[in-house]
Every structure is written in C-alpha cells, then in structure tokens.
Image: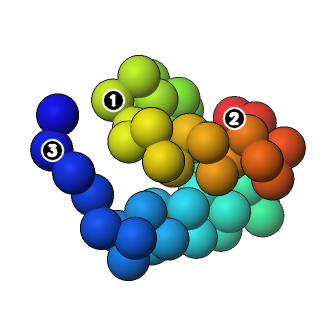
Amino acid sequence: MSKFSSKEIESQYNLIKMLLSDPEKYKDAIDAVKKDIDYMPVELKKKLEEEKITL
C-alpha cells in the first residue's frame, strides 16, 4: 500500500466530514465511502476513530 501525505489524509477527512454534515443530501456518496472503507489509509481510519466519526 502506498504512503499518503498528511495533506491527502486531511483532504479526505474534510470530505467525509462535509458529506456527513448533510447525510440525506450525500447519501449516495456516503454509501460509496462505506464500500471503500477497507481501502482507506490507516492514518485516516485512526483520525476518524479519534473524532468518533462513524459511517
């Protein structure tokens, strides 16, 4: 698995937070993220867990 920069991790994290801000509007995108969660960088998974953000 390739390494991700902190900018990439932060960008993905912010995107997920934005999608979760309006779950009804972004339902399809949230569902797509849920399917790809196994392929997320470990750093991003840890950050989401620390913030108690669940999909």
Would you say residue 55 is visible in this rendering? yes
Q: Amino acid at mark 2?
A: Leu
Look at the numbered disc 1 and give the secondary structure of its residue.
Answer: helix
Q: Badge 1: few (under 14), some or many (20 or more) residues near its Cα, within 10 Å?
A: few
3 vs 1, front mark: 3
Look at the numbered disc 2 and give the secondary structure of its residue.
Answer: loop
Q: How many marks?
A: 3
Quick one: which residue is furthest to the right in this view? 52
Quadrant, the C terminus: top right
Find disc 3 in the rendering and name its residue: 2
Quick one: which residue is furthest to the left in this view? 2
State whether residue 27 is above or below residue 5.
above
Find disc 1 in the rendering and name its residue: 39
Looking at the picture, how far across and down is residue 24, in whole percent? 75, 49
Cα gap from disc 2 to disc 1, whole angstroms: 14 Å
Find disc 2 in the rendering and name its residue: 55
Which residue shows up at 45% across the image and 38% down it? Answer: 42
2 vs 1, front mark: 1
Cα gap from disc 2 to disc 3, whole angstroms: 24 Å
2 vs 3, front mark: 3
Q: Badge 2: few (under 14), some or many (20 or more) residues near its Cα, within 10 Å?
A: few
Looking at the picture, how far across and down is residue 20, in whole percent? 72, 55
Quadrant, the N terminus: top left
Q: Amino acid at mark 1?
A: Tyr
